[in-house]
Amino acid sequence: MSGCGVLINPKSEIRNRFDRGEWLTEVGCYNLFVTEPHAKLAVFPGSFDPFHVGHVAIVERALRIFPQVIVGVLQNTGKDSVFGADERAEMIREHYRDTPAVEVRSFSGLLVNFMQEMDATIIIRGMRAVSDFEYEFQMALMNRRLWPPVETVFLTPKEEVLYLSSRLVREVVALGGDVTGLVPDAVRERLEIWFRETNSPPG
Ligand code: PNS
């Protein structure tokens, strides 16, 4: 029989059964590819200016698949960022201070170089809508072209906050709107300080 290749984790019970000779008689497959154990680490990169509850939901989902997630905060956003990279990373760190499975790091330059430094091959990205697709698809292919072992995993967002983006959060705060529930508390407090400072009369 051909064409029924199966991927078997070398540490799984299925593999033990294969070794005991039970697998072949039960399923009748002769092609066997033994995989490496799954990746232990994934990197969730972004500008995170600011980090919002949509990002929190993606980290949560990523942790259901990977035991450790590194949130990679891009330093040189080249955009009109509200917060500097250190401050963005600090806020996210504060949010995850009781979650050892999440580590927060800043990076500059190419993402694939950062991935290699972290000894990681999995990139996590959230895909909100069709409008995200082209940019995300190009980025995934470019990253793979730059470093072939890299794999991008797209996770679906939380439906309730599908409309949410960092740009909208910045805009609402700049116009005095309330973003409670849309960003972690640590982020909201700093956004409020930023609003007061940018709107207080000079002198
Ligand atoms: O939150 P963002 O702004 O959509 O995140 C974009 C990010 C940080 C993932 C992307 O801009 C990036 O990876 N920048 C690093 C520079 C790089 O590697 N560019 C080539 C990949 S296409």
Image (cartoon, rainbow, N blue to C red):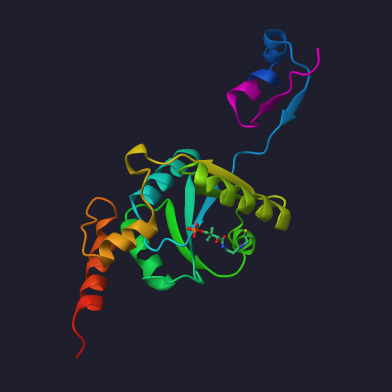
Residue in the image at 59% along x and 23% along y: 13
How far from the left and from the top, in percent, is residue 169?
32, 58
* Placement of the C terminus among the 4 image quadrants: bottom left
Residue furthest out toward the bottom: 203
Residue 147 quadrant: bottom right
Is 107 in the magenta?
no
* Placement of the N terminus among the 4 image quadrants: top right
Residue furthest out toward the top: 25
Q: Is residue 100 left or right of residue 202?
A: right
Near-viewer residue (167 or 26) = 167
Is 7 in the magenta?
yes
The quadrant of the rendered image in which ligand 1 is seen is bottom right
Magenta stretch, residue numbers: 1-16
How far from the left and from the top, in percent, is residue 110?
62, 65
91 to 25, vertically: above or below: below
Near-viewer residue (182 or 173) = 173
